[in-house]
Every structure is written in structure tokens, then in C-alpha cells.
Image (cartoon, rainbow, N blue to C red):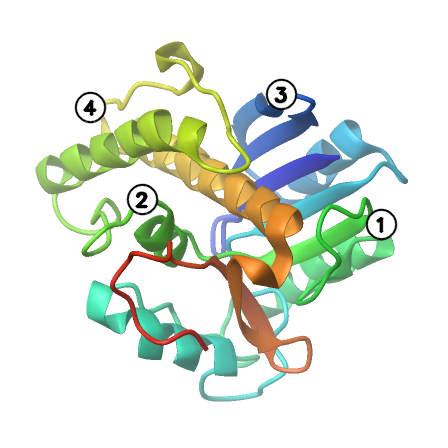
Amino acid sequence: MKFLGIDLGWQTGASGLCCLDLTPQGLRLGDFCCVSRHDQVLDWIEAHVGTDQPALVAVDAPTLIPNETGMRLPDRLAHRYFGRYDAGCYPANRGRPFAAGLIQFSQALEAQGFRHAPTLKPQKPGRYQIELFPHPATIHLFRLPRILKYKKGSLAQRRPELEKLRRYQLTQLPHLDPPLPLEEGDLPPIPTGGKAMKAVEDQLDSLTCAYAGAHWWWWGCDRNWVLGDESTGFIVVPAPFPDQVCPVAP
């Protein structure tokens, strides 16, 4: 089983990609890269899992967008449960300029056999796709009091926050269940230039997506939340640990 994290470019098409392989010892980091177009993402997926190998694709983008206007149910729920952490998500509807491309991307995954999986039987091989929003995932996985603000602000403000994300991934993911062992050299260093830093940001977000996708497949609803469903769109979020102070589960 493979877990493919896609930080999908909504506007420009530039995307971060991460592949995790399931081994008897736990997860293993495989490919980790960036591409510039959506068709290259689809080619990358096929190169890793062919047309029939079991895999879960976790996409950081709204892929099910049934509403013509306003906000989707999962977007509203994300604001309800994670707004206090500054982790509300960008609203999606079919009137947005990015909507058609994201829907087409999801439909292309469906054509390759990746079904939407707001529910699944844990640890059952198959071909699945889910929507994943990295900020809520890191809030629970890393026990954060608020999001790491590496997406907005000046370069001087964003860079140390991105360094924190990288450090959390290196130090925390090896100790979660399922474990993902990581070494310092496995993750790219944080550049000082804005364009290069954005590429690394996309990669690190794709790693969060891939790991949270593996967590969903491993535990299902026992240790994950699902905001919404297939008719409304849905976002999968790892559940908080039992001792965490958090909103009531949806």
C-alpha cells in the first residue's frame, strides 16, 4: 500500500508531492518532489502506483464541490472546529475560478479507480482519494495551540514558522502510530529565497497530507474525524489524542 500526498496548486498548478510506502516496520519516505502542472501530478501518480496498485491519494484542495455558491459544509465545519486555532479553510464553490480544474483533477483520479473515501474499512487495500487540509492535521498530530503561520506574512516571519513545521515532522512523525522514521537529511532544508521556500513549503505540506492519509487508512473513524460526506464534500482530520484539550468531535 502506498500513500500519496498532493499539495495541489489551485491557481498556478505548481504542486508538492510525497509518496510513503507501507513496510513491515512502518511507513517509509519514498519520492518527494514538486511539479508545475496538474497533468504532471497525474503522471507522477501513475508512475508510482500504475493502474491497479493499492494506494490512497490525500489531496490538499477541494475536490468535491457540489455547491454553486457560498461555502461547502466541510468548509463551515472547519471554521467551527478549527477557527479558534486560525485554521479555517478557504471557501469553495463552483463559481470560483479554480473550481473546474480541481473537479477535473478529482474526476481524473476516479477514472484511475481512486474512489472518494469518507468511510473505509481500516487497513483494507484499495484505491482511495480523500481531501486533506494540513493545518487542522498538524494541530492534532503535533498538539499545537495554533497553526504554524508559514503561509502569510513577510519572508522573515514565514521562514521560522516553516522551520518549526519541518522540525515537528522530523521529531514527531517517527513516534506516532503508524510510525514514519525520518532523518535530518530526508527533508529539504528551508531556503532563504521566497520562490525556493514556497517549493519546500509545498513539499512539507504534501508530507503532512501523505502521513494523515496513512493515518486515515490505518485507523479509520476510530482515530480520525470526517467533516462532511461525499454529497457535500468532506475533509479528513486526524482526531486529537485523548488527553488533548479540543472542541467536541463532530
x and y percentages locating residue 179 in the rendered image: 51, 30
Cα distance in 3D space between marks 4 and 3: 35 Å
x and y percentages locating residue 4 in the rendered image: 63, 39
Question: Reading the chain from its start, which is encountered first: label 4 or label 2?
Answer: 2
| Residue plotted at (44% across, 19% down) | 182
Question: Reading the chain from its start, which is encountered first: label 1 or label 2?
Answer: 1
Residue 112, labelled with which disc?
Answer: 1
x and y percentages locating residue 56 in the rendered image: 70, 46
Give the image quarter of residue 86.
bottom left
Q: Are marks 4 and 2 in contact (CB under 8 Å)?
A: no
Quadrant for the N terminus, please.
Answer: top right
| Residue plotted at (27% across, 24% down) | 190
Q: Residue furthest top?
A: 185
| Residue plotted at (65% across, 38% down) | 3
Residue 25, labelled with which disc?
Answer: 3
Q: Secondary structure at mark 3?
A: loop
x and y percentages locating residue 103 in the rendered image: 66, 66
Badge 3 amino acid:
Gln
Q: Which of the two discs, 3 and 1, sits closer to the camera?
A: 3
Cα distance in 3D space between marks 3 and 1: 29 Å
Badge 1 amino acid:
Gln
**Residue 197 visible:** no
Q: Report the residue marked by disc 2.
A: 142
Q: Report the residue marked by disc 4.
A: 192
Classify 10 Å Cα crowding around label 4: few (below 14), some (14-19), many (20 and above): few
- Residue 80 lies, with reference to residue 172, above or below; the image says below
Q: Which of the two discs, 3 and 2, sits closer to the camera?
A: 3
Badge 4 amino acid:
Thr
Q: Which of the two discs, 4 and 2, sits closer to the camera?
A: 2
- Relative side of 155 to 29, left or right: left
